[in-house]
Amino acid sequence: MLKKIYVLIFLVLMFSLAKAQLAKQKEDWFVIGYGQGYKYFNKDMFGKNFGGAYFFNNYKNFYKRAGIDITYNPNLRRTLNNINFGFGKQVKSKYITFNINAGPSFYWGKLNSNQTLITLGLSAQSGIYYNLLPDLAIGIEGFTNANFIQSTHGFRICVMGMQPVR
């Protein structure tokens, strides 16, 4: 339990650092990816992970993120669903895009005992992408979903698309 508190404190600090966006971009973007989720502790969730998010740029030096992460284990027929909201920053060059964000999350799913869980927690993501085209990139994203009942973290391969805002 104490280790989870430390993880949550770390994520709160990360959230406070991710308030400002370095490059003022006039575009929104989305990310969708598939990967592997790992558990923090014995009771936590592991398995395949699917995640997606939409990033809203409001031109005030930061962006907002709304996303969903689903970690599932087909052998155990268990899932951990996570709807998350966050704030973050993005650094973009001609070939590489990096973003980091964190914020609160709402979780629901099943425990090992087949009992339903509903809880709040923190979610954070960090990704690095190679820009294939001006509006399309591919990369890797690290994520963490921490709460006091059942958490997960891992990596996924992602596709990022950008939508210019006029």
Image (cartoon, rainbow, N blue to C red):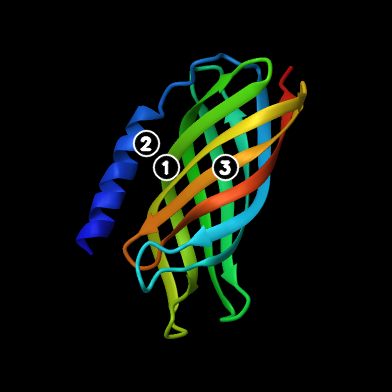
Q: Quadrant of the N terminus?
A: bottom left
State the image coordinates of residue 107 (x, y, percent, origin top left): 46, 62
Residue with the most extreme bottom position: 113
Name the foreground residue: 158 vs 149: 158
Type of amino acid under label 3: Glu
Q: Residues within 10 Å of mark 3 (few under 14, many from 20)?
A: many
Give me the residue at 44% from left, 77% from top.
111
Residue that mark 3 sits on: 141
Question: Element under label 1?
Answer: strand
Q: Amino acid at mark 1?
A: Gly
How many labels sit on residues? 3
Q: State whether residue 146 is above or below residue 140.
A: below
The location of residue 163, given as percent across then percent down, is 74, 27
Q: Quadrant of the C terminus?
A: top right
> In the displayed image of the protein, which residue is found farthest to the left?
2
Coordinates of residue 7 in the picture (x, y in percent): 30, 51
**What residue is pinned by disc 2?**
15
Local secondary structure at mark 3: strand
Q: Please, what is the three-letter code of the amino acid marked with disc 2?
A: Phe
Q: Is residue 13 above or below residue 22?
A: below
43 horizontally vs 53: left or right: left
Q: Are marks 2 and 1 in contact (CB under 8 Å)?
A: yes
Q: Tell me which numbered mark, 2 or 3, is placed earlier along the sequence.
A: 2
The residue at 53%/30% (across/down) is 99
Q: Which residue is mark 1?
A: 103
Using residue 70 as the reference point, say whether residue 84 is left or right of it. Answer: left
Residue 45, relative to residue 61: is it above or below? below
Real-space Cα distance between discs 2 and 1? 6 Å
Real-space Cα separation, disc 2 to disc 3, in angstroms: 17 Å
**Mark 2 neighbour class, 10 Å CA radius: few under 14, some 14 to 19, many 20 or more:** many
